[in-house]
Each structure stands twice: as structure tokens, then as C-alpha cells.
Amino acid sequence: MNWQGWAEIALTLGLALALGWPLGIFMSRVWNRESTWLDPILRPVERVFYAAGGIDPGKSQGWLGYAGSLIAFNVAGFVLLYAMLRLQHLLPFNPQGFAGVSPDLAFNTAVSFVTNTNWQSYGGETTMSHFTQMAGLTTQNFVSAATGATIAAAFARAFAGNRETGVGNFWADLIRTTLYVLLPASLVLGIALVGMGVVQSLAASVTATTVEGASQTISVAPAASQLAIKQLGINGGGIFNVNSAHPLENPNPLSNLATAVAINTLGWAAFFAFGRTALANKNIRALATAAIVILAAGAAVIYVSEAQPAPALVAAGIDNPVYMEGKETRFGIAGSSAWAAQTTGASNGSVNAMHDSFSPLGGGMAMLLMLLGEILPGGIGSGIAIMVVMAVLSVFVAGLMVGRTPEYLGKKIEAREIQFAMVAVLIAPLSVLGLSATAIFFPGALDSLWNAGPHGLSEVLYAYTSTTANNGSAFGGLSANVPYWNTTLGIAMLLGRFVPIVAVLAIAGSIVAKPRLAPSTGTLPTTGPLFVTLLIGIIIILGALQYFPALALGPIVEHFQVLEAIAAK
Amino acid sequence: MRSGARVGPHNLEARDMLDVVFLGLGIAILALSLGLARLLARV
């Protein structure tokens, strides 16, 4: 550890938060259909989409109609992407001549990209054609990110509304977020990444001569364009199997910083956009404060854990300063730790180091950041939506303690909202713990594990955590490209995505119909340090209560095993 | 199409049935989400 390392982590986390503020104001203007400086170019394009789809953007939908449109859009996206994956051998831009993927992998991959997870059971450069990457996966990177944003837009309008029924128009929110926010931001970042040396090519490969004189074939791909949206859209994954540890996807420290910052920028922007749209800037700044405090603490734990000597080398009597297995020497411990925190605090999941090789506590912290609900800042919109659910639970708990009816952002919180909030929050432990337990007992499922004991359990837990949280990063010691894992991980992604979406929209529908109340002397302040502390407590206690027994059997016991092994030497 | 070939599920091969299973699974879970929404609307 050194001050440069701490400064790099602070810069990465801080830049994303700082950039999120102005972008959040812009995003809110897009959601609210206010004028923007992009109107002269994009308004005509927007009208074409409305005309083609027969959409009246001014027609506000009730929450059930909004949810129905969202699910219908995702059914169509899933079927289309599934077909594209199965038939890629018949489609153009396939210079490597890849065959169509198997049905179980097509299911897993289609679900993965539709749900904004980007879990990849395959190696991109050896499985997917350029057409699949560009027309299938990258398209879903845009629209799945925009789908997440629509939830926050609807939820924010619900708090701003006063005895209304509509929460907005899903199709307008989807189109406007894609056109005005995601496309321009990706264009700028994509071109900048090409300038930094990220590969962008439709060729199959290039041939190089090694220093020994041998011939080496190196796969190339249209990587920069996908990299831009998969970071900004908080999708994750990547064209190359090792994501941003690959020198053609992440060639230097500048590209590493730019893409690490990009992971969380629009997630924070969605926080601030929510605050502006819900007329509650101060309250949402308090939520952002709680989120950045937990994220920074998580990054610090990972950095401290990874900046220790590798125990196996210590045990062998070899002097070594830090854990470097599975990490890029170009990025080092701080660069890997900052990325690991950013990618798991957000629902991104791209990696620049192999999380399976992290120390037990470092890898365990990456897992915990996902288990806390992907709210630090989580996905675009989906993160702030679940964070607001956490805030609703916090005011409910506080209301119970002081004996008053809880209120949040000017709306009374009653039994109905708490019931829906519990649906949104409890689906995650049901999926993570239920599917992990099933896998452990299911005959043959554990044949895919490369490790036994606590680390093997961590690999199983990490897989279902990552997919349920729609993160997509992985402990690589689990060979998941077999029917059992492709199927069950796909189910986890669907449950983790759509059950909370439906529950949040149901809360929105309930909230929007209520009168907007002015704060009174009996209202719990939700802007100050007291509320931030309460919220952090609720988030951590929820995570600890639900998952502590499982984590104790995985990364925590593995940590003590490592200490014991070192002591024995 | 060869003469006399039957059209429909009878001439689906096993691997085609897997497509039906996986497409059906994805659509079913998404449809269940909509079912959950309708259930919550009644609460």
C-alpha cells in the first residue's frame, strides 16, 4: 500500500461521482421531456421512432401498463437475441466462421444481455461472430441499460406526482434515454478509446511474428464501440474473454482509468436525475452519500486485502510484497482494487483482474458489494430505484421506533409499499441461497467446480450472487458452460431483474396516487447525517443477516484457513 | 420440402425441442413477472 494507490482509488471513485452530477441534470431533462442542446439533431429521429411505433409520448401509462410494456419489450428482445445466437452461422459478418451456439448457451446469453447482466459462459473471441456482437449483444447493451433507467424515471415521477395515476410512458422513456444519453455518451467514449489504442476492426485476426520468430494469430474485433456502451450502460462483460485485462481492450493506464470511471458515471447520474425529477435533490444526495461511503469502504477493504504478501509464497519462504496472481502488472493492486469495487458496487461485472484469484477477504468483499443490492450506485436507474426502496425501509424502521407514520419524499409510506418493498428485497436471498443450495445437492452440478472446500462454495455463491444481482462478473474456477449452470444461472438473472422491477413499479403506482405532503414537525429528516447513518445500518444489517451464514462458510472460513496455514509454517 | 413431409411439431427433432424448452422457459418467467404485477395490483 502507498499513497499513490489510495489516490488512484479516490480519483477513480471521485471522478465517476463528479461526472455523474452534470450528466444527472441532463438525464433528468431527458426524462422530463425538457429541451436539451441535442434537440435539433435528435428530436426528428425521436419522432421517426414514435411514428413507426404508433407511440404517443405524452400519454402517461399507469404502473401496470408501464410494467406490461417493459416486459413485452424484453420478451421480444430475448426471442430475437436467442434466434440470432442460434443462427449466427447463417448471418453476415462472421469471418471466423463460428457455428450457432448451443440452445442452453443461447438461453443463458440472451437472458444475460436482456437483463443487463452480461454474464458470459463463453469466451467472446472464440464463440461470437462480429454480427452477433454488434447487432445482438451491443444493441441489448443499449436497450437493457435504458430499460433500467425507465424504472427510475417512473419511480421519480411517482414521488413528484400529486394524486395522479400515470407514471410516464415507457416507450418514450426508453427511446429518449437511448437516443439522448446512451448513444452520444458512447460515441464520445468509443472514439476516445480508439484514440487510446483500443482495437476497432471487422477483420477476424492479425498475424504477428513473435521475438522467437514464430507466427502468432491474434483475434481482433470491433471492441472499442462495445466497450464504450458496456461500461457506460453498466452492462459489463466484453468481446474478449478476460475483458479489460486484455491489452487490445485496455491497452494502458489512461484507458484503464477512463473505463473504470465510465463504469459508475451514469449510475451516479441516475441518482442525481432521480433527485431532480422527484423534486428531492437534497434527499437523494443523502442516498448518494451513503452509497459512496459504503463503496469507498469496500474499495479500501479490497485494497488492503490484496496489498498483502501472497500466503502460499510466504509459506514457501519466498519474499513477495503483494498478491499478484490473476492481476495485470500494468494496473497493479490499486488499479485492480478500484476496478473490482467499481464493477461490483455497480451492476457492471467487467473485470481487469481475475476475482477468483483475489484473497478470500478481497473476493468476499467484491461478493458482498453485490449482495448489498447493487445500489453503490448499481445499474442506471435500477440502482437508485432499489436504494430508494432501502430508504423507504429505513423510514419505516425509524417510524416504528418513534411511533409515527413514516413519510419519504412527501409521501406517506404504508403497509402496501412495505409489502412491495419486501418483494423487491427478498427475491435476491431466495435466488442466491436457494439456487446455491440446490446446486450443491444436484447430482453432477459440482463437477464444474475447480476447487473444493470453502473456495468451491465461494465460487458457487459468487455465480448466483453475480447473476441474481445482474452483475456478470465471475469467479473463473466455475466452468459454467454446461446445461445445468447455463439454465439455472439464466433463471437467477431473470428473477433478479424482473421481480424487483415489477415490485418497484408497483410501489410507484401506489405512491403516485397519494397526495404530496409538506414536511411537518413530525417528519423524520431524510437529508442529514442521522438518516445517512441509519440507511447505512439498514443496508449492512440486511446484507449481513441474509448472507452472513453463507459468507462465513465461504470467504470468511477460507481467510482463517489461510492464516492458519501461514502460522503453521 | 420433400413430398409428404408433415409440417408441425411431429417432425421436430430433439435439438429443436431444446429450442422450444429454452425459449419457453425464458418467456414463461417473463410472463410470470407480469402475473406477479397483476397480483400486486390487486393487493
Image (cartoon, grey):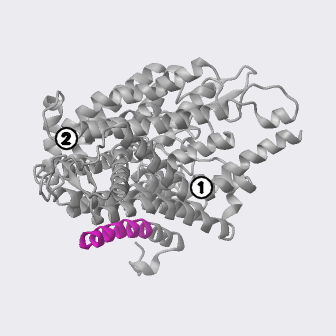
* Image label count: 2
Quadrant containing the N terminus of chain A in the rendered view: top right
Label 2, label 1: how many angstroms apart (C-alpha)? 37 Å
Q: Is residue A201 visible?
A: no
Residue type, numbered disc 1: Phe
Q: Quadrant of residue A22?
A: top left
Q: What chain letter is assigned to the residue under label 1?
A: A
Q: Nearer the viewer, residue A428 or A520?
A: A520
Three-letter amino acid code at the position of disc 2: Leu
Query: In which quarter of the view is residue A225 placed?
Result: top left
For the stretch drawn in magenta, what is the main secondary structure?
helix
Q: Nearer the viewer, residue A559 or A15?
A: A559
Residue A300 picture location, percent across and down:
57, 32
A128 is higher (above) or lower (below) than A242: below
- Tell me where residue A129 appears, x and y as whole percent: 48, 44
Give left or right: position of A464 versus A272. Answer: right
Q: Position of residue A505 (x, y in %)?
A: 27, 58
Crowd tier of the residue under label 1, counting other residues whose Cα lies within 10 Å: few below 14, some 14–19, many 20 or above: some
Q: Earlier in the sequence, mark 2 or mark 1?
A: 2
* Chain assignment, label 2: A
Judge by depth and name the residue closer to the eye, A311 or A256. Answer: A311
Q: Nearer the viewer, residue A94 or A411?
A: A411
Q: What segment is highlighted magenta in the picture?
A: B23-43
* Residue located at (42% from left, 39% from top): A291
* Residue at x 47% of width, y 59% of height: A428
| Residue displayed at 62% across by 43% down | A363
Q: Which residue is mark 2?
A: A279
Residue at disc 1, secondary structure: helix
Is B29 part of what is drawn in magenta?
Answer: yes
Q: Report which residue position mark 1 lands on.
A: A548
